Image: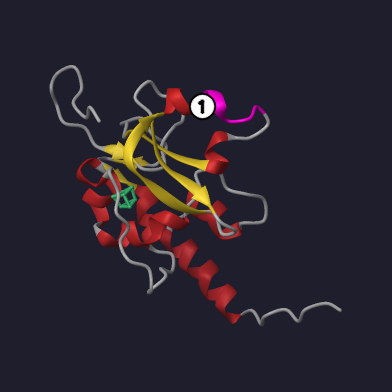
Amino acid sequence: MNTADRTGTTRTWCPSGKADAPESVVLGVRSGQDGEVVYLADPVPARDVLPVVPEDVEPTRVLRFASHCVSNCLHRRGNDCTLVERVAATPADGNRNVPRCHLRPHCKWWVQTGVDGCRRCPALATTVVEGDDLGALVADPATTREQLEAWMAAEADTPAREPIG
Ligand code: SF4
């Protein structure tokens, strides 16, 4: 992966990036029933993969992409990524190891949160599916940490629904 820009500056990369940026690479494949990301051993240019994704499938539904972390991103606050702040506020699977990941030396989330981001990273989808209320809150740049924590506390207080039938 070429992580230097034209001025030779080392860049950080977003692990929930765009599929269609010139530098985009495939970070991993969402697989299994839960759609967890299986990370590729090496980056593959997105432009080599996008042509084989069926037209009626949103590429970010089945793949995760990495692209440059950019200053005009909606999730930026100064030099920080607020998306990974919200991600890190969500519950982590305590049994999950930190995944092997080719992006780590250049990853904005790793730089900012270390293993906190990595433990949650495989469960994340760049495109939030309908009905994933927590995912929608995390993805919304307007969501504050207090709102996120209040939502999770309310969910924890909600009794589990009885199965129908
Ligand atoms: S596993 Fe960690 S280093 Fe790799 S993309 Fe996710 S947050 Fe970044």
| Residue 85: in magenta span | no
> How is this picture coloured?
secondary structure
Q: Residue furthest top?
A: 6
Q: Which residue is mark 1?
A: 50
Q: Quadrant of residue 88?
A: bottom left
**Along the viewing direction, whichever of 96 and 128 lies nearer the viewer:** 96
| Quadrant in which residue 87 is drawn | bottom left
Q: Residue at x 64, y 35 (%)?
A: 57
Q: Residue furthest left?
A: 8
Q: Is residue 54 magenta?
A: yes
- Residue sitting at 49 percent across and 41 percent down? 63
Give the position of the N terminus as an image quadrant.
top left
Question: Residue 102: x percent and y percent?
Answer: 27, 44
> Measured from the top left, where is residue 69 in percent x and y?
31, 35
- Eyeballing the image, is 160 above or below 14? below
Q: Amino acid at mark 1?
A: Leu
| Residue 142 appears in the figure | no
Query: Which secondary structure, mark 1?
Result: helix
Give residue 109's position: percent from left, percent from top. Answer: 29, 49
